[in-house]
Amino acid sequence: MGRFLARRMVSYAVLVVLATTFAYLLAASTLSPRVNYEEHSPQPTEEQVDRRLDELNLNDKTPLAERWFEWATGVARGDFGATVTGTSVNEELERRVWVSLRLVTVGTVLGSAIGVGVGAYAAVRQYRAFDRVSTVAAFLLLATPPVVLAISLQVLATTFNDAVGARVFVFNGESTLGLDAGFWGTLWDRVAHMILPTLALALPQFAAFSRYQRNMMLDVLGSDFVRTARAKGLSRRDALLKHALRTAMIPTVTYFTFTFGVMMAATTFTEKIYNWNGMGSWVVDSIDNQDVHAVAAVSCFMAVCFVVASFLSDVLYAWLDPRIRVG
Amino acid sequence: MNMSVEHGAREARPSREAGEARVPGRWTNVLRRTLATRRVVIGLCGIALLATMAWLGPLLSPWELGERDTPPFLRPPSPEHWWGTDAIGRDVFVDTMVGLRKSIVIGLLVAVLSTCIAAVVGGFAGYFLGATDRVLMWITDLALVLPSFLILAIVSPALRDRGWLVFVILLAAFMWMVTAKMVRGMTMALKEREYVLAAHYMGVPAWRIIFGHIIPNMSSLLVVDATINVSAAIITETSLSYFGFGARGSDVSLGSLIAEGARSATTHPWLFVFCTGLLVVLVLAVNLVGDGLRDALDPQSNHRY
């Protein structure tokens, strides 16, 4: 099992390197940081622009291979280069990574855990009220694009705030600027800001997982080994939790990796709409600013996230499925 | 499922009237099952209704696409402007219908294309295994790891002038991976079946076995997957257009309408509610068809809604 995971690690690492390189090459050949200088006044001369771009390693007159080599040697030393404005990508990265990770982790864990729970319970209560309600909710949520969901939540929150006459829901930024309310006050402020974006991320996850888990659970519920477990005297609860759910969760764990990619894209929309300065909103901003190095850094981050999710699902898979443990 | 029981009973019956009695073929069976699944029928009706609306609606409306009414702008819905007008006096109904049309066409094309890619890649990887498999699966993994939204966002503005067909190809290029992996798994199982082995020993070339025996045998999986991809494509297209990364500059799509409407969702709800509502209904209808088809085509599934 250790060797199996180690081998997966190596191939994942290579994938991250390839994905980042590909994103860099694509961004470097498509985006043109030169455009940013066109609207400066006074208009800088071409030499000035060239000199500045050379400093930043963004000059499109330098051959792509040369630029890539300089960038790659930097990345190998842990330096992602400079943004178009000359600041360090690393500093920006450090600031933004935690913002996004907080959102993604809480959203994923909440969404998938509740989704699996609701889906499994719905399967046990097939065709009862709980099942029907959760199915309708999941179908509606699955039909709502993340953008629309995030905006709708905002609209609902505004309406609610207006109706109550107080700011119950806040949906702009990560925290109130210049707030001085001590540790607990600050913490509460941050949590309050997190509620809506986290919901916007967790709800689609919940919908996807509850549908999937329900189908998997239905496949397992009628199987012989669950009946055997009951027959040998296990309580219904134990038979369902330890035998049925555990087996039914194996395919869901693989599914987790696939939904994660969708989730990363959804983060982009959520952060942009709720004005969070995380990695996701950086994607949109850096493309708008023709910021090649930032794009490469974000791609690297997203690839790492995806790979970590795949690795986690490998580990979970191995833990859940006794047959896999040999590798 | 009772279908297979019936089928078994029919086979077991001594064929007294063999030759006269028509045993329903696979596709007749599939069609019957499909129409017996209520979700599929509801979903198909929904899609048909939306498509009719999208293509005939603008003809019925007195307003043309891009035609502007005189001020005051931002009029609420009225008999004259069924769904109101926007900030520069355009008729929201006509705009939304044209956007809906584009979403439907893009969704269908992307789904068909990406499922084809997936079938070919998965089929070849699973049939040949070895080096072919390793190379193809590496490409698949790489495409999965690449942040597709980011790549699409970078590339599509650069290709904006080439028209929306290029956009369709781009979208499809990032949607085939998961299906390809499933197809590969199924191909490896089908490869050991007698009829595939028979074809192989009769000297049928590998590509004809893949296209003639293997891919048709998982057509149900592919049909279901194509349906699911339709909704995924529509959602991705909307999201890209929302941020202005869609391929079609000044053209309307549901995404660009939602982006415009979102800013005034609370003050002028008609700008936001109609396009969003139609989008949700469209995706919901497609999902219903996909979900129903999965049950109808999968002999092992037990009626699950």
Image (cartoon, rainbow, N blue to C red):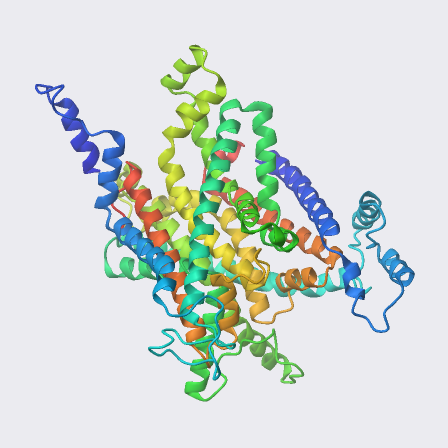
- Compared across the picture, whether B234 is left or right of A54 comes to left
Residue A83 visible in image: no
Residue B83 position, x and y percent, is 38, 73
As displayed, is residue A288 above or below residue A314? below
Q: How many marks?
A: 0
Residue B281 visible in image: yes
Q: Give the residue furthest to the top.
A: B202
As displayed, is residue B57 above or below residue B300? below
Residue B91 position, x and y percent, is 44, 72
Residue A15 position, x and y percent, is 65, 41
Screen quadrant of the N terminus of chain B: top left
- Compared across the picture, whether B98 is left or right of A286 comes to left
Residue shown at 69% from the left, 61% from the top:
A286
- Compared across the picture, whether B290 is left or right of A10 comes to left
Residue in the foreground of this view, choosing between B73 and A218: B73
Quarter of the rendering containing residue A268: bottom right
Residue in the foreground of this view, choosing between B38 and B300: B38
Residue in the foreground of this view, choosing between A229 and B233: B233
Residue A300 position, x and y percent, is 68, 51
As displayed, is residue B68 above or below residue A36? below
Residue in the foreground of this view, choosing between B202 and A106: B202
Q: Give the residue furthest to the bottom.
A: A165
Residue shown at 71% from the left, 51% from the top:
A30
